[in-house]
């Protein structure tokens, strides 16, 4: 949450406004996404979870993706999208394997 932590907590609070229970687990420094999951491991307690980044845009939402995950039980699920100019993409050389 970085420099905007106060604004986020002031806006989201404990989540009750939306019928949610929100728990904040803060990194002592920006040490990456894997570190964030690692320090949340006890809280996650072996349950499935979604890591949804604020800059991700998923046109039709994630409901069907979560249902697919629950049904197929993969170890992980990564979402990718075709882009008009793949040479501008970090993933330009990624090949899909099914």
Image: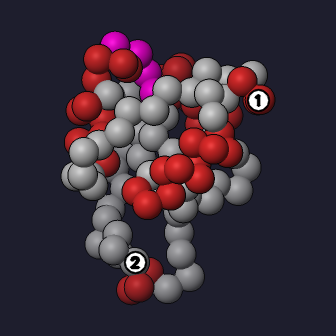
Q: Where is residue 81 in the image (x, y as percent from the top left)?
A: 53, 63
Residue 94, quarter of picture:
bottom left
Question: Observer-nearest residue: 77 or 5?
Answer: 5
Q: Nearer the viewer, mark 2 or mark 1?
A: 1
Q: Do tag 2 and tag 1 residues touch (Cβ < 8 Å)?
A: no
What residue do we see at 59% from left, 53% from top?
7
x and y percentages locating residue 90 in the rendered image:
33, 74
* Residue 93 picture location, percent across and down: 29, 72
Residue 64 in sight? no
**Residue 12: horizontal and vertical position, in percent?**
65, 39
- Residue 37 location, quadrant: top left
Which quadrant, please, contains the C terminus? Answer: top left
Whichever of callouts 2 and 1 sits on the residue coming sooner in the sequence is 1
Decide if residue 81 is on the left or right side of residue 26.
right
Image disc number at residue 89 = 2
Give the magenta-colored segment's residue range: 45-49
The residue lying toward the viewer, choosing from 25 and 55, is 25
Q: Which mark is on residue 18?
A: 1
- Residue at 67%, 45% in the rendered image: 11
Q: Is residue 77 above or below residue 70?
A: below
Q: Is residue 3 left or right of residue 63?
A: left
Callout 2: helix, strand or loop? loop
Residue at x-position 42% and y-position 46%: 78
């Amino acid at each position: 949450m970085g420099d905007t932590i106060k604004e986020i907590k002031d806006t989201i609070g404990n989540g009750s406004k939306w019928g949610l229970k929100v728990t904040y687990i803060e990194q002592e420094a920006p040490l990456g996404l894997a570190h964030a999951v690692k320090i949340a491991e006890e809280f996650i307690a072996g349950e499935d979870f979604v890591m949804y980044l604020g800059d991700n845009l998923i046109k039709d939402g994630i409901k069907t993706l979560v249902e697919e995950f629950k049904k197929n039980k993969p170890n992980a699920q990564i979402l990718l999208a075709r882009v008009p100019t793949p040479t501008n993409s970090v993933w330009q050389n990624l090949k899909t394997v099914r």
